[in-house]
Image (cartoon, rainbow, N blue to C red):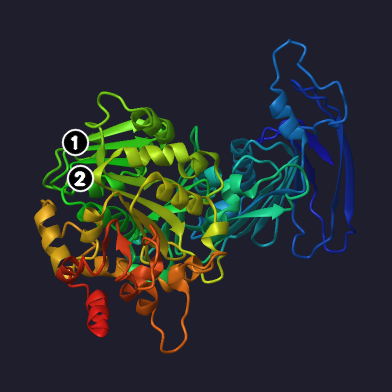
Amino acid sequence: ILLHPQSHLNSASNTLPPTDANQGDMTMKMQIDLPAMKGKNRSSITFTATVLRSEEAPARHTVHYLDVAAVSDPEEKDIGPSSDDEEVDEEDLAEEVRHQPSGQHVLVDIKDVDANFLNSKERLAQAMLDLIEESKVTLLSYHCHSYVPFRVSCVGVALESHISIHTWPHEGIIILDLFTCGTKPLIPILPTIEKLFAVRREAIPGEIDEKAPEPRMIWSHKLRGFRDGFGPYNRYQNPLDQELGSDVLSRRDLDLKVSLLSEETDFQHVDIIELIDPRAHYLGSTPDKILFLDGVQQSTLYGEAEYHEALVHPAMITHPNPKRVAIIGGGEGATLREVLKHNTVDEVIMVEIDGELVEICKDFLPEWNNCSDIVGSDAESCFDDSKATVVYGDAFGWFIDKFGNKTEDYEKEKFDVIIMDALDPDVFVEIVGSLYKDNVFVESLFAGLTEEGVFVVQLGEADSMDQPSLETGGDAAQMMKGLSEAGFQSMLVYDEGHSHFYAPWDYLVCFKNSKSRANWHRTAAEIETELHRRLYRTRSGKPALLFFDGSTMNSYQVPSKVTEVIYCRNEITPQECKKYPEGDTFLDEVQGGFNERPVYSPVFERHPQRNLHMTHGSKTNFELLPGILSSNNTMVRNAIERKH
């Protein structure tokens, strides 16, 4: 055994002489005394390596020892500052010595890689060391084997677990996996893996354009081990344990998957993924981009128009003349973009708690917040439009300060439309709860609207048929109750199924009085006429809206059957949900006397004939027949014709 104190890899190295097929297995044992490192107790490592006889690998075997030792037992009490009295971060030490039975695993496959690189254990070992250094894991030892005639395998043993590399030079393929027990995310090191190992090969003479193809890397990220029951753990606070991990990072069947950004702001974790899903072939070959906040999908390049148009335009087109609009959340800028398409708007105030998110979206998601094609906009970025004001702060406190206590400017500062585009109400993160649960905030929303004001909020994934009643619902149900108690005269739930989420998406629209409410049930032709009058044209000549139109609005006028079923599951069955014996009609029953129509009732929206005798203030629907007939709503007209 020859010992080289300093090899070209800057480590101690043991090289075994060549073996032949008849020679037995060879074992070597070595003890290395390691110097103490700041803040850590160091001792010696005893390293034993057995080189097994193999006909495939009769050539030279190399084992490298890195000058690093294991961290001392966490039970020892003498871990502390080094002799130079420099402070050591106790939290960092605790993190380094704590190894729960869980971790992260990155699996990487790359093809069209240079054969010479793949057959060089020296170059591969150096690349592995560079990756280990970038990953900030503590490497204990590593070794590489060359096979005859080709191929190399390398393995590194780390305090946090391992890295392994296997190559097929003739095929131009390398397979790599990196596992760590640490909590530092591995996703940000993927570009480093690609830079170090995706070495482009030289072109083969006669190859098309005499240019070798770019190496192609596919990868997946998985959470490993067990977390529950081994210390405090909340999966909702781990982005990798949400949709980001299960629906994107763990998949290996994507034609393209690139992490454009994985970054922690002061309020949430932001991930932006670019991908091509072979199952979504109808989208073409242009990559999709997906924004995740705390691991929960927020919007996609191919679905954001459907989502944001469904959120903004039904409420905007229902209000007769919206001039002042408030947006709660909407950090991507797409909600702001849709509002600025309306020529009635004089001012938009957007209240977003996370200023870092806005800057990220400007840089990575410009398609969401580009207003350059809107004739009425004077800026390329919607955030810079002269009619837009972006307030970085807590919308909860901002609205309570403005409208919780009446001031001199109270009336002048009211809004015609308030749009709430915050995180889903049932997402378990701290910054969401107060926006949906606090009645003082909900009352400030009501107080902040003009007399014909409209409030709209996205409620998240639509309910399924097996959901419990609203009385046992989460934050969304609590908010609906608070809105009703605050004084809204009417509330409606509608859903949109084309937003590229994993289910239809629910929205709640609330009307402060019946005048705006009456506009909700206009015909498709009336809506189209109003959109033509209301919206700015585009500089490119393309349609101002990609998805929303009069027919789409008509589909929002009738709640889903699921919404009706869940509403009727309340402990005290609403009167309009009750079934009557054959021959008895709901209309005959209501003439006996009903209370005023409830603020929220999907039954009445789905069955207008049940609505005729209900009261709106001091008038019944029979007294409002002229207005109902003028709406030309097919369901209402048919119900009236059947009755008379």
Point out the image quarter for the C terminus.
bottom left
Q: Nearer the viewer, residue 314 or 280?
A: 314
Q: Is residue 504 visible?
A: yes
SS under mark 2: loop
Q: Is residue 369 visible?
A: no
SS under mark 1: loop
Point out the image quarter for the N terminus.
top right
Dot label at residue 387: 1
Check whether the beta carbons of the residues at disc 2 and disc 1 lie within 8 A of each other.
yes
Query: Residue most toward the top?
Result: 84
Q: Residue at x 43, y 71 (%)?
A: 576
565 vs 348, left or right, is: right
Q: Amino acid at mark 1?
A: Lys
Q: Amino acid at mark 2?
A: Leu
Residue 322 screen position, x and y as percent = 19, 46
Residue 537 screen position, x and y as percent = 10, 53
Instruction: Note whether 504 is above or below 349 in the view shown.
Output: below
Q: Earlier in the sequence, mark 2 or mark 1?
A: 2
Instruction: Note whether 59 is above or below 409 in the view shown.
Output: below
Q: Nearer the viewer, residue 166 or 211?
A: 166
15 vs 465, left or right, is: right
Q: Mark 2 — residue? A: 340
583 vs 174, left or right, is: left
Count the labels in the image: 2
Instruction: Note whether 563 is above or below 420 in the view shown.
Output: below
Residue 336 screen position, x and y as percent = 27, 44
Query: Residue most toward the front?
Result: 592
Q: Quadrant of residue 447?
A: top left
Residue 32 screen position, x and y as percent = 85, 32
